Amino acid sequence: MGGGPEPLRTLPETGAEGSEREARAQTLAITLHQLRLFWTLAHARSLTQAAKQLGISQPALSQALAKLERLLGQRLVDRQAAKLELTDAGRFLLERAGRLLAEADALESGLAAYKAGLRGRVSVGVLASIARTLLPPALELARRTVPELALDVHEVAPQEAIEGLYGRTLEAAVVSETAVASDHLPFTRIPLREDGYALAVPASLRLDDVLEPERELDAEAQTVLGRTIEFNFGTLHADRVAEWYRRVLPRARTLARVRTYETALAMVESGHGVALVPQLTAQLAGRMLFAVRLYAVPTMERRLVALVPGHRRRMEPLNTFLEALTVAARELRVVPVAPPPPFVVARAAG
């Protein structure tokens, strides 16, 4: 804020008691910067994770914590525990720090809005496949209300987006609800849409009426169906995908593990194998992006949600962007996919 963080001080009081309290308050000149460091640290699993979220070194964060504890004259974090645990004083400070930081954020946002008028910038973390699908129509809608709205897009994995929210480098994150342990996240969750999964196969491979692939497909088709290209982001959804392959394609072997759905689909398009992908990853604005066949996968989907700190939810221009994102997700045009092959239905239910 302005020329750097200002210390938080109490108003002066009259009389001997007021002078004593004022003197104590002068020694507790906690800055907003210190509170932000502590708030992020308190929500992290370790000093290393907190330092990464804050974009500083671990030694620098340790020194900042030690300085704050010396200022307060008491421990805030139990360093003997296997993981970061707050002391009673730390929990007390955390509760109050959250309120103060919310007010500081509201102050900064409000002053920026007065200064900029109809200008604004929103920082959002999102997977690349979701970004290209949802952000263009959402930005178009939002700019009807805020003509000079700009987006600062961070194409990152879901967990990195969560860390950005904790570190306050992101204002919102668009993620798959199945990719994060969302029940325990201290953020407001805004449902966007459900995105079904599909089995992507090369365009030359037809599975429409196949009940027993091992008997009905020729050797070449069986070879292709037996090679999988798997998305490898270490999400909570990975076990579910592995179980699906075990049931439906028990003889399949992993040909490649990739970091993006786009790479997986490109390899499928080239005939190297098959991949289980969210339907939206293969298309854009109602048209297919890859020359592949998509077969629906029953009972599997990813629920796309926007996560945002609760105190920021109604701030502008973030609020306008989130409303536009919700509308864009609801009205998104999608390419229909083929019904699941008979063997997929039978084996997935078995």
Image (cartoon, helix red, strand yellow):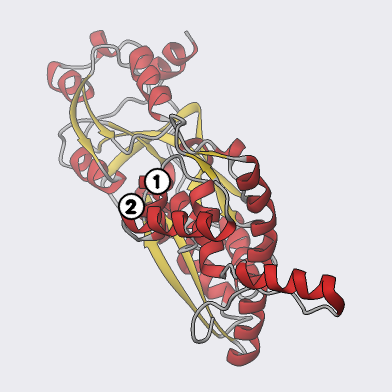
N-term-proximal mark, 2 vs 1: 1
* Residue 301 visible from this viewpoint: yes
Residue at mark 2: 58
* Camera-side residue of 125 and 194: 125
Q: On residue 14, which mark appears?
A: none
Quarter of the N terminus within the rendering: bottom right
Q: Find numbered disc 1 in the image and state the secondary structure of the residue it sits on.
A: helix
58, above or below 201, in the image: below
Q: Residues within 10 Å of mark 2 (few under 14, many from 20)?
A: some
Q: Residue furthest right?
A: 15
Where on the picture, by quarter, is residue 101?
A: bottom right
* Camera-side residue of 261 and 44: 44
Residue 67, image x and y in percent?
A: 46, 59
Work out how far the residue at label 2 is from the one at label 1, CA to CA, in angstroms: 6 Å
Name the kind of residue labelled 1 in the image: Leu
Q: Residue at x 63, y 61 (%)?
A: 327
* Camera-side residue of 263 and 54: 54
Where on the picture, by quarter, is residue 13?
A: bottom right
Q: Residue at x 52, y 43 (%)?
A: 77
Residue 318, image x and y in percent?
A: 60, 70
Q: Residue at x 47, y 50 (%)?
A: 162
164, above or below 349, in the image: below
* Residue 173 visible from this viewpoint: no
Residue at mark 1: 47
Marks 2 & 1, CB-CB < 8 Å contact: yes
Residue 229, image x and y in percent?
A: 23, 32
